[in-house]
Amino acid sequence: MYNLNMINKEITQKNYTNNCEVYQLVFPIETGILIPEDDSVRLLSQILEELYYKNLNEAYSSQGRKPAVEPKILFKILVYAYMNDIYSSRKIEKACKRDINFMWLLQGRKAPDHNTIARFRSKRLVGVVDDLFNQLVEKLKTYGEVEFKNIFIDGTKIEANANKYTFVWKKSTDKFQAKLQEKIKEIIEKINFEFKTEYIISEPEAKIEYLQEILKFLNKNREHENIEFVHGQGKRKTKIQKFIE
């Protein structure tokens, strides 16, 4: 019976380059000649080249060796990746090695690994990203790419601070807001009944200033009656504590 280990050894040790001259893949020295003149990567690079990167450069230590890839180029890579719905640092690394547009942005430099990209995004950019994107929006305005006439709200889910696994959708927030306004009106009716007041919410939504006025009234009554707030199981809250809360 033929030894399977010998088969594997023969396969893995075989030289596949002996007769591959006709399959040689040759890239031009200048990758830019393969990118169309009107490609979005060219416009992006031109616009980002005009930004002011002093704050980003200062995010790096002046001591030690210089970064393998210039911060400005890393920023271009990141923005272009986001434009193409690439967010994973590993996928961005792969794109830098395989996609000719990313190679062109790198200007002949070695593709950054995913750790470099992750550190750049989570540490270097944190304090300067708002400034850079503000500059980008202003540049887009000068190029006539944005007019600030419309506001668009997409379906992005927003992560809540209370629970990292809780996501809030716009429809859910609208529904919650409507219920909240109903609850506010219900509580104000109870306050009017209890204190013989005449607070009225005539508009669709209660204004914060008006609610603060009611809150001041409740706190004055609390101080006047010297009511102590209670908390915990088995403690009975007064009506005024419930209204204020």
Image (tube, helix red, strand yellow):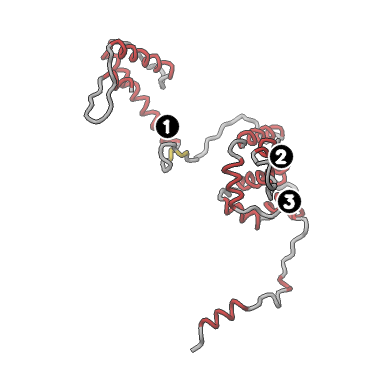
In this orientation, does residue 40 appear?
no
Q: Please tell me whether residue 81 is drawn above or below residue 200 in the rendered image.
A: below
Residue kind at label 1, given as amino acid type: Asp
Kindly identify the residue that appears in the image at 32 percent across and 18 percent down: 188
Kindly identify the residue that appears in the image at 67 percent across and 44 percent down: 76
**Residue 47, disc:** 2
Which residue, given by chain and number where applicable, does mark 1 sit on?
174
Residue 178: image location, x then y, percent:
38, 28
For residue 21, side relative to residue 183 (left or right): right
Which residue, given by chain and number where applicable, does mark 3 sit on?
107
Near mark 1 (Cα within 10 A), the count class, few <14, some 14-19 or many ≥20, is few
Q: Secondary structure at mark 3?
A: loop
Q: Earlier in the sequence, mark 3 or mark 1?
A: 3
**Most foreground residue, 225 or 82:** 225
Residue 226: image location, x then y, percent:
28, 13
Marks 3, 1: nearer the viewer: 3
Residue kind at label 3, given as amino acid type: Gln
Toward which corner of the image does residue 241 lie, by quadrant? top left
Q: Earlier in the sequence, mark 3 or mark 2?
A: 2
Q: Earlier in the sequence, mark 1 or mark 2?
A: 2
Measured Cα–Cα span from mark 3 to mark 2: 16 Å
In this orientation, does residue 181 appear?
yes
Measured Cα–Cα span from mark 1 to mark 2: 38 Å
